Amino acid sequence: MIHADLLKITQEFGSPVYVYDSEKITKQYKRLTEAFKKVKHLRLHYAVKALSNLSILRLFNQLGSALDTVSIQEVRLGIAAGFEPGKIIFTPNGVSMEELEEAVELGVQINIDNLLILEQFGAKHPSVPVCIRINPHVMAGGNTNISVGHIDSKFGISIHQMPHVLRIVENTSMNINGIHMHTGSDILDIGVFLHAAEILFDAAAQFKNLEFLDFGSGFKVPYHEGDIETDVEELGAKLTKRFNEFCKSYGRELTLAFEPGKFLVSEAGLFLAKVNVVKQTTSTVFAQIDSGFNHLIRPMFYGSKHDIINISHPKRNKRFYSVVGYICETDTFANNKMISEISEGDILAFKNAGAYCYSMASNYNSRFRPPEVLWHKGKAHLIRQRETFEDIMRNQIEVAL
Ligand SMILES: *Cc1c(COP(=O)(O)O)cnc(C)c1O
């Protein structure tokens, strides 16, 4: 996608707008597959929550991907996009038995992350295969908002509770066919990740009927120039070796599964917004766009630093800007950011807007959620229209007061 294509998209579909490049998604999918090509049975479960548009799910289905889902609604979306239920893993946390049973009825792979439900489920459905989510208590990275494998995390069954897990499995004769971990933190130190993998192997060795081991995700992608990323090729080489050794000692060829979200879609997405006002104050220059954290909350929620380019005037001299939104709240996208000199009406492109951007958007300030466009084979396809005032009114019930 060149700047002219993007500007045309804002003319055709208005601003703000999300744009996704199918070619980049495909490239990332192939890169990860290639890094693990020496694993006999590899399965990538795209994490739906990163970007859950149906057309994106269809693209993943075409690529041969499986899905990772965290709610029954995501399961339904996957099925609606044409996925066979057997290729969908349901990895919720803290959901009710009723929701799990809906998933059983839909025929998807169940993944359980607490002892209470494991016991109830095993007693009720001993023949339904279940994967167990363990928490290896490995602390990687420093951000506890996105790090879910550490000791105080709510996710997974503590590795120290394995004796209790085994007792439940024995008492109920349930069928455990997979072991899972998802630490949630970025894989930056491959040594730390391999350490967690060893804990998973130790846990796995205690079950007789496994079909797969699921290593979750945590693939970090670069957000700005010079940013660090997961070396997937190094991870591929090292984990493949250990995984193949484990299969040998286990006595069966297991499937190695991953659940990448961000890695597959983050860099494929751009968020395009228009500058409404350039406002000079005594200390800074604000560029105020026609959006806010209602459309893109990652910078405010996680402190993510999305790169921002003035695609209307990319060649002008750069100046320092505070890029902010138009909602009645502090909604700073970037501070002291060097951007080519901005005029009112210019279009800014926010990079890495594929993952956890649209899917976290809201109607705060009663604004419409933006449209989504898929750039596929040199053409722009509208894959979700901008909301309208009817969407804001829908489901509201006016009582006579
Ligand atoms: C969110 C999530 C993922 C995807 O994580 P990314 O960082 O986007 O790759 C994978 N597995 C589970 C269980 C998740 O909750």
Image: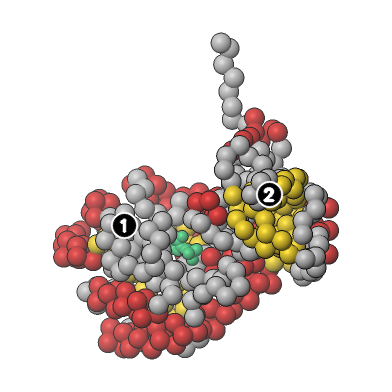
Q: What amino acid is found at the position of numbered circle 2 in the picture? A: Phe
Q: Which mark is residue 51?
A: none
Camera sees residue 160: yes
Residue drawn at 83 percent across, 58 percent down: 8
- Indicate the position of residue 180 as horizontal and vertical percent values: 35, 67
Q: Which of marks 1 and 2 is nearer the N terminus?
A: 1
Is 50 on the left-hand or right-hand side of 315?
left
Q: In this view, does 61 lie above or below 299?
A: below
- Indicate the position of residue 318 as horizontal and vertical percent values: 73, 64
Is 40 on the left-hand or right-hand side of 328?
left
Along the line of sight, which residue is nearer the eye, 174 or 381?
381
Is 362 on the left-hand or right-hand side of 370?
left
Q: Is residue 318 above or below residue 385?
A: below
- On-image quarter of the C terminus: top right
How busy is the neighbourhood of tag 1: few (under 14 within 10 Å), some, or many (20 plus)? some
Residue drawn at 77 percent across, 66 percent down: 317
Q: What amino acid is found at the position of numbered circle 1 in the picture? A: Ser
Residue drawn at 27 percent across, 74 percent down: 199
Q: Residue 286 carries which label?
A: 2
Q: From mark 1 to mark 2, how far is it between C-alphas?
A: 38 Å
The residue that mark 1 highlights is: 153
Instruction: Name the front one of labels 1 and 2.
Output: 2
Tell me the SS state at disc 2.
Answer: strand
- Indicate the position of residue 68 as horizontal and vertical percent values: 47, 62
